[in-house]
Image: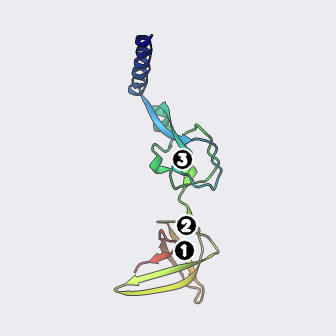
Amino acid sequence: MLIRSLFLALVLVFSAAAARAAGGIDLPVPRQTIQAGTEISHQDLIERSFPTRTAQQFAVSTNRGQLVGMVARRTLLPGQPVPISSVEKPVLVRRGEPARLVFREQGLMIIMQVEALQNGGAGNFVRVRNVDSGLVVSGRVQEDGTIRVEN
């Protein structure tokens, strides 16, 4: 009985390895339904095997690093590969809301209140309007939600 169990375990291991060698790929998929606007965590994802052509034919996320910390743009279904276009960086700057603009050059730092003209996540360029002068400038959104302008 022990030999039979061991044999079955070996068959399962080798058949899984053969399936991978024959063109399978493990992709991260939602463990349960993820609603639009929800930030994706490591616990929300599991790995599931798909044919290699799935990742080649469709623009889907191929590793957890592409998904963790991102926000779902639409409802993501459990067990289904996640299209890259279905997630985005968390929005740190919202259109119409106040934001802080930071300008730094050679030890000089100027901080001013601005109104965001676009939504943006970390690393995105957004246009903002100076509340006092009405001047419109563009800057890059920083991780802390401030907008940095460079000369």
Depth check: 72 or 131 in front? Answer: 72
Q: Nearer the viewer, mark 1 or mark 2?
A: 2
Q: What residue is shown with label 2?
A: 120
Work out whether mark 3 precedes mark 1 in sequence or the reverse, and give the earlier one: 3
Q: Secondary structure at mark 3?
A: helix
Q: What residue is shown with label 3?
A: 43
What residue is drawn where x is 65% and y is 47%? Answer: 75
Amino acid at the residue labelled 1? Arg
Q: What residue is shown with label 1?
A: 127
Report, in whole angstroms, how far the alpha carbon at label 3 lies from the one at label 1. 35 Å
Specify whether 75 is left or right of 8: right
Q: Secondary structure at mark 2?
A: strand
Vertical side of 61 occupied by 145: above or below: below
x and y percent of residue 126 in the render?
53, 71
Q: What is the quadrant of the N terminus in the image?
A: top left
Q: Residues within 10 Å of mark 2 (few under 14, many from 20)?
A: many
What residue is drawn where x is 58% and y is 38%? Answer: 80
